[in-house]
Image (cartoon, grey):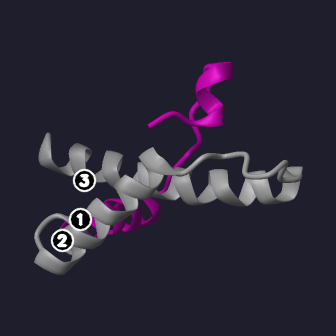
Amino acid sequence: MSSPYDEIGAQPEWSEADRERHNRLDYLYHRVFAQNEDGAELLGLWEEYLKMSAADVNGSDAYNLGKEEGKKTFIRNVVLTIRKVENE
């Protein structure tokens, strides 16, 4: 995953508690969406939505385009988090 800090070559300072909370969230995503049959099915449906939905539908305005991109970004982040946990 990339971070806005990557572009300027800096990394945010994370406390140990923040790092543990972040790692815990990663493993929860993995458990819910990769280890659970219903979660895996839901993620598959979301991925299909991501692939098949057009960003600009009938001349959507910037607000609605942003909402659609936000949904897609969430799905991408779940998938990337699962891959990260599986590759650790």
Q: Is residue 53 above or below residue 31?
A: above
Please state which amino acid type lies under the numbered disc 3.
Ile
Distance from the alpha carbon under mark 1 to that under mark 2: 6 Å
Q: Which residue is mark 3?
A: 82
Magenta residues, start to end = 1-30
For marks 3 and 1 on the same chain, the one whose residue lies earlier in the sequence? 1
The answer to the question of whether label 1 and label 2 lie on touching residues, with beta carbons closer than 8 A, is yes
What label does residue 10 carry, if any? none
Distance from the alpha carbon under mark 2 to that under mark 3: 9 Å
Q: Which residue is mark 2?
A: 31
Disc 1 vs disc 2: which is toward the camera? 2
The spot of residue 40 in percent (x, y) is 20, 68
Please state which amino acid type lies under the numbered disc 2.
Arg
Residue lying furthest bottom? 38
Q: Which residue is mark 1?
A: 27
Residue at point 29%, 72% (across, down): 42
The answer to the question of whether label 3 and label 1 lie on touching residues, with beta carbons closer than 8 A, is no
Residue at point 36%, 54% (across, down): 47
Q: Is residue 9 above or below residue 36?
A: above
Given residues 3 and 82, the one toward you in this image is 82
Q: Is residue 28 left or right of residue 37?
A: right
Q: Is residue 88 above or below residue 18?
A: above
The spot of residue 78 in percent (x, y) is 37, 57
Distance from the alpha carbon under mark 3 to that under mark 1: 8 Å
Q: Is residue 66 left or right of residue 9?
A: right
Q: Across the whole image, how many numbered discs are drawn on residues? A: 3
Residue lying furthest front? 58
State which quarter of the image contains the N terminus.
top left
